[in-house]
Amino acid sequence: MIDIRIIRENPEAVRASQRARGADESVVDVILSADESRRKALQAFEDLRSEQKSLSRTIGQASADERPAILAKAKELSEQVKALEAESNAADQAFTEAMFKLPNLIEDGVPAGGEDDYVVLKHVGEPRDFATEGFEPKDHLDVAEAIDAVDMARGTKVAGSRFYYLKGVGARLELALLTAAADQAEKYGFTLLTTPTLVNPDIMGGTGFLGAHADEIYYLPADDLYLTGTSEVALAGYHKDEIIDLTQGPIRYAGWSTCYRREAGSYGKDTRGIIRVHQFNKVEMFSYCDPTDALEEHERFLAWEEEMIAKAELPYRVINTAAGDLGSSAAQKFDCEAWLPTQNRYMEVTSTSNCTTFQARRLNTRFRGENGTNAVATLNGTLATTRWLVAMLENHQQADGSLYIPAALRPYMGGREVIEPVKK
C-alpha cells in the first residue's frame, strides 16, 4: 500500500496516477475520509482511556464514602472505553480496506493508457529473413513435435486443455535455460531458493495479487491456500514481519518454482502449443533494497534480463509498459519481448517491476535507516521461463527440421549444437 502521508499531502498526484491507470479516482477521497474517521475515533478512544486511567489512580486514595461513586464512574467509563475501542478498530479496518483498493503510485515516465499504449525503448537484434533462406518457418509446436520435444495430446488427456508434457530434448532444453538462469543469478549475488508454490491469504493479498486479477489464481478452499503464479509471491513473503539488514546493499534472491495460472478471460488467445498454459517453470529474481536505490536496482534487473536473452540468441525489444497494464503492486514495469516469426509479432518473455514500498508496507518488511525503521522497496524480474522455448523453437529452427542450440546453452545440453528431427 501507499504511505498515507503521500495521499494526505499530495492527493492530486495520487488522482493523476489513477487517471493514468484508467482507474477510479474517487478511491482517493474515500481513503482520506476513512483516514479522518480513523484518527478521530482513535483520538476519542485514547482520550477516554486516559481519563479512565486517571480515575483508577484515585481509587486507592479515596475515602470509604467517595469510593462507591468513583467505582460506579469507573465502571461506566470502562464500558464507554470498550465501545470507543470497538469503534476505533472498525474505523481502522475500514481505512485498511480502502487502502488495499488503491494500486501503487506510478513512477514518472510511465506512459498513460492501456495494453496498447506502451512505449518501445529499444530493439536488439534482427529477425531472421526466412524467405531469403528459402523456407517457410513452422510454428513452435510443429518444430517441437518434429524433434519429439512435447506431447500436447497426452497433457490434455491427463489434466485438460493447456497442459502438456515436455519430453526428452524438450525437457532438457527447459532445464538448460533454467539452470543457466540460476547460474547467472548466483554470479550476480542472488541466493537461489526453491520456493513454496502454495501460500496463505496474507501472503497472496500482501503482494497485491488478490485484486482485479484474483480470478487468475488457483485457490484450494479446503486448505485456504493459493497456488502461486510466480515465485515473487513466496519471495515477497520470505521476510514478512521482519526488520532486515541492508547495510551491505540489496538482499537478492532467485526463486526457482513451478507456477500456476488459470488464464481466466484468455479464451481463444494463444491456445495452440505452450505460449499460454496453466503450468510452467520459472526462475525469478527478487530484491529487497533501500527505496532510494530502487530505480537503479530496476535498471540492473533489466540489464540482467537482457544478458540472459542474449544467451538464448533471440531478437527482442524492450517496452515501458503503460500504467493501465501494470499490476496493482507495480510502479513501473519493463517488458522484454522476443520476436515470433510465424505470428509476425513480439511476445513477452520477461518483465521486471519496481514495486517501491507497496508490498513491504502490506507485509511489514522494514529496514533500519538514518531516520529510523522504514519500509523496504521490493523489485522482481523474470530471468527464464518455459515460454522462452516458444521463441527459441521458432527462431532457431533449420530448413531440415533440426533445431540450433545457442552456444551459451550447449554446456547444459551435453555439448549438443543441433537437435535433429526424429525419423518416423
Image (cartoon, rainbow, N blue to C red):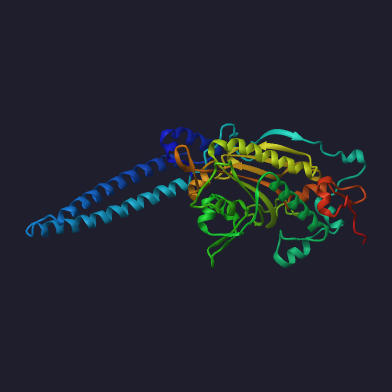
Front-lying residue, 377 or 269? 377
Residue 101: x percent and y percent? 48, 47
Is residue 160 shown above or below 231? below
120 lies left or right of 295: right
Is residue 172 found left or right of 90 in the rendered image? right
Instruction: Please tell me in which quadrant of the rendered image residue 80 appears.
Output: bottom left
Evaluate whether residue 253 shows in this view.
Answer: yes
Could you tell me which residue is drawn at 72 percent across and 67 percent down? 158
Residue 410 appears left or right of 220: right
Residue 168 location, x and y as percent? 82, 60
Residue placed furthest toward the left: 65
The quarter of the image holding the C terminus is bottom right
Looking at the image, residue 138 sits to the left or right of residue 121; the answer is: right
Locate residue 93, reporting x and y percent: 39, 51
Residue 28 position, x and y percent, is: 44, 40
> Which of the two residues, 338 or 265, is positioned nearer the viewer here?
338
